[in-house]
Image: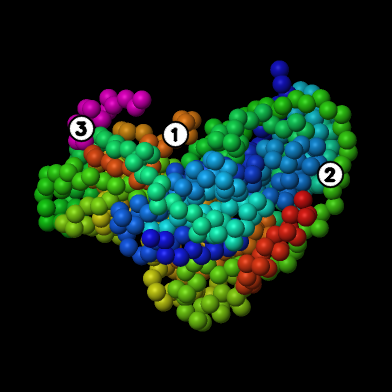
Amino acid sequence: MSSYFKILRAGINSTFQDLGRFQLQHLGVAPSGCMDKFLFSISNKLVGNKSSEGALEFAYQGPLLELVGESASVGVSGKIKFNIIKKNGEIINGESNESFLIQNGDKIDILSTIDSAYGYLAVSGGFKLQKVNGSISTLVRARIGSNDGDKLKIGEKILLNNINSSFTPKKIKLDLEKDNIIRVIKGLQFNYFSNNSREDFFSKEYKVTRLTDRMGMRLEGEKLENIVSTNIKSEGIIKGSVQIPGDGQPIILLSDHPTIGGYPKIANIITADYDKLVQKTPGSKIKFKMVDLTIAESAFRQYVRKF
Amino acid sequence: MLKKIRNIGDCGISCDFGDEVSKKTNREVIKLFNFIMEATRNKKLKGILNSTPSYNKLIINFDLAKVKSKELIEFINSSDYSKTTLLEKNKNVEIPICYDEEFALDIKRLENKTKLSFKEIVDKHLKTNFFVYMIGFVPGHPFMGDLGKELEIDRLETPRVRLPKGSVGVVEKFCNIYSFESPGGWNIIGKTPFDLFDINKKDPSKLLPGDTVKFKSISKKELLTFKNE
């Protein structure tokens, strides 16, 4: 019998994710995959997994898990407040970005993310999950992927790939960016917006609203005036696109984005700043900065060196 | 013809075939789409994550660690994909539809706007040889055309929050099928029991861009007893 985690509390939005499912967008399937690639990879690194191994992604309040079976090494990445509750009732403060060993009957209680939205929990050897079209990622909206395409639910058991590797303590010091500057490249319909609105977009702050999830991030700020048409012929979407619907308030499309869409796009987030963006919580303010492709590509080279 | 290629952020390109929405333009898009998919399979092209055809554009998303937009644009510009055939890959599909008033939620609106009787609307719908322009929004969901001018109708002013799976809708010259229960603003003309998407199949989507579709009228009883393969 393999070991498993019993879900005593599911958390707000806990799903299994890896690097995403590709080559299916032309059939209406969004790529999904982890929101913060860097923290996802850190969680796997902590427990010696390959960097693409499926991990548990949680948002804000995470799950309460009880281990049943053999001891396992666990890594929680991000800025996370969590406790390890030993079988004898002893409560230990959890340290994120540091691996730890838990025994049969111990619990991990992910209380909250701190000034950030997403965190990851990886276990040595990985979770026992079935790949669907090359990925274990869960796309809840289309009911595709691990856990029957659904979020974690209370009472479920998540099986582990029992790897009896010896425990090696590991600690990774993270230097996470805290600023609110998000770099973008001009979007396909940049010239649909008035000169004033183009200026506003780059000079004013935009507030992240509560209407934000894995699909998209709705912002609130200076209304952007469309001088051409508020609808375009529907076209393929790439994550990080900043679309402006009729009400003039930006929506940034994220990992579970619709596959095609009919709103004009003023800008696209550069790959190197995507992780920073998705960690912004409702109420925080961001500012867009225009860069060109050369700068975006060199920022990407710098970004991958962190991994 | 491919009019221009533009960057989308740092990991995408848009191949634009002009502003016209027609089968002719869309066929060009699908040719390039088939060509990119084939080049990816044959490993002539690396780093392609997704390639999404729409009415008049092909949007390609790539892995910046494996390929840069400049290389990809050069590859497309130096390729002759005009000979990529559509015929081998594309098929004609017959889709059963029940026009019973229980499912045709917008009969009244359709009759009022088109000044045709529902029977006339159904006849025209059944006669149309639909072309699948693109699949998307939700998995397996087709955007098809072209309905005749006399059937053209706008979206609902207020979209429905929830439409049953299988609902068939019309807007402007287009027809769709809600492959999953979802919100939607199209005028519902009937319902199909035909499953359009199953992720566990080798070919998850029954329809592909470039396929053609004809509807076949079935009774409510046939709808309820229909068995998907």
The amino acid type of the residue labelled 2 equals: Glu
Q: Which residues are magenta?
A: B216-229
Q: Which mark is residue B218?
A: 3
The amino acid type of the residue labelled 1 equals: Asp
Are dots 1 and 2 on a single chain? no
Q: Marks 1 and 2, Cα distance to the nearest angstrom?
A: 43 Å
Q: Marks 3 and 2, Cα distance to the nearest angstrom?
A: 62 Å
Query: Residue B208: x and y, percent?
Result: 38, 42
Residue A164 left/right relative to A281: right
Are dots 1 and 3 on a single chain? yes
Locate residue B214: give its quadrant: top left
Task: Please name whichever residue, A1 or A59, is drawn nearer the observer in this view of the structure.
Answer: A1
Residue A119 left/right relative to A15: right
Mark 3 surroundings within 10 Å by alpha-carbon count, few (fewer than 14), some (14 through 19), many (20 or more)? some
What residue would you read off at disc 2?
A98
The label nearer to you, 1 versus 2, is 1
Chain where mark 1 sits = B
What residue would you read off at disc 1?
B203
The amino acid type of the residue labelled 3 equals: Ile
Say what secondary structure mark 3 lies in: loop
Q: Marks 1 and 3, Cα distance to the nearest angstrom?
A: 26 Å
The label nearer to you, 3 versus 2, is 3
Name the quarter where the N terminus of chain A is drawn: top right
Name the residue located 83 percent from the left edge and 28 percent from the top edge: A165
Q: Residue furthest top?
A: A1
Mark 2 surroundings within 10 Å by alpha-carbon count, few (fewer than 14), some (14 through 19), many (20 or more)? many
